[in-house]
Image (cartoon, rainbow, N blue to C red):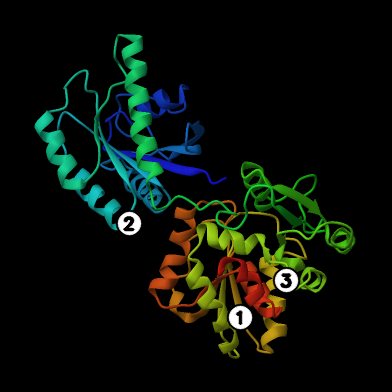
Amino acid sequence: MQVLNIGVFGRTNTGKSSLVNALTGQEISIVSDQAGTTTDPVGKRMEIPEIGPCRLVDTAGLDDVTDLGAQRVNKSRAWLNRVDLALILFNSNSFTKLEQDLAIQLRGLKVPFVLVHTQSDIVPLDEALAQELSEKYGTDVLEFSVALLDEQEQQENIELLLAFIIKALSSSPLRERPMFEGLVEEKQTVVLVCPIDVSAPTGRLILPQVMAIRDLLDRRSTAVVLQVEELADYLATHPTPDLVVTDSQAFAPVSACVPPEVPLTSFSVLLARSKGPFAEYVAGAASIDALQDGDKILILESCTHHASCEDIGRVKLPRLFQKYTGKQLQFTVVAGLDPLPENLRDYRLVVQCGGCMINKRELLSRVNPAMEAGIPICNYGMAIAYMNGIFQRSIAPFCR
């Protein structure tokens, strides 16, 4: 399941760290009256009812004027491209140009936000201001404090903030689509082909496989997990499954084994539908045939890992591209959330990994610059399926 990022933004000494500590019930961030106490953004995982796992991110004050203030502010603002929800904190009924610009920027990014008037035990929120802000920005405005003397009243204040967070996230267009939504019904059977080879992590399944199993359990469906070598025997001795999902790297042998009337796709294609720009990926795959000698391909990995000799993004995909196109191509790999190349328009194709380690908001922030520049985009699974001649079959389950 995706981990949603909730960013806490505002000027110095508006109580950002105190709010994070109150929500988590732990002393995650150092609290001090001294401006610039929070330097680098600090994240803390927590589970929010009805939403699931979230990461609260305490950022530095956006008006930080200390010696390292500019660097701190830049790091904090970088989170605007990663958050699924922002809490904009202000106090003393002072909603300055800084908060106004931040709200406008978030609206431009289509990121929902809640306005939180903090330290309201000292200076209560002006009702007229609250109504004005709510109407202007189309969002909720909450009066909040972490210093209420009545313990029950304090807990109710925290629960009200959580209710506002749940409301905003529940209606957000950035929420991921469940992997098997509209594909699998209760009591249906799905075969998950999970190769255990040199590229598989030791002692565990990769995250997309775990996500698939959990979603099928939630749907009261049956998940059959096996390796490529066991697939033929299973198909010959059991009722026909309703869907087969394979690791993209095993697409070719699995496709040869699964009867054409049985729907087949991959974990990566499921992720493309769940959190990626699916239609743009489909269109981008066709651009592979137009690649020419010397063209540059940008490969985006969304996690940091030790690259092996059989690494899919750095070794297998480039090798497959060269073999399929017969062209001499150039490849650039950008790992994690490192900055994209400045010369983005020099690339003829961007290939994004499935994105299992990041959420929809983070993934879109990676591929949006390419789309805005008119560069075709695709993801690992779709590219592999296309170059193995089974692309149409891999997306057919989503076109019914």
In the displayed orientation, state which residue is furthest to the top.
Answer: 150
Q: Sequence order check: which comes first, mark 2 or mark 1?
A: 2
- Using the image, determine if residue 116 lies above or below residue 306: above
The CA span between labels 3 and 2 is: 42 Å
The residue pinned by badge 1 equals 330
- Using the image, determine if residue 16 lies above or below residue 342: above
Q: Sequence order check: which comes first, mark 3 or mark 1?
A: 3
Q: Sequence order check: which comes first, mark 3 or mark 2?
A: 2
As shown in the figure, which amino acid type bears the numbered disc 1?
Gln
Q: Could you classify mark 2 by the number of other residues whose Cα lies within 10 Å: few (under 14), some (14-19), or many (20 or more)?
A: few
Q: Position of residue 314 (x, y in %)?
A: 68, 68
The answer to which quarter of the image holds residue 382 is: bottom right
Q: Is residue 76 visible?
A: yes
The CA span between labels 3 and 1 is: 38 Å
Q: Position of residue 116 (x, y in %)?
A: 26, 33
The residue pinned by badge 3 equals 261
Find numbered disc 3 in the image and state the secondary structure of the residue it sits on.
loop
Q: Which mark is residue 109?
A: 2
Quadrant (top left, top right, bottom left, bottom right) of the C terminus? bottom right
Q: Are marks 3 and 2 in contact (CB under 8 Å)?
A: no
As shown in the figure, which amino acid type bears the numbered disc 2?
Leu
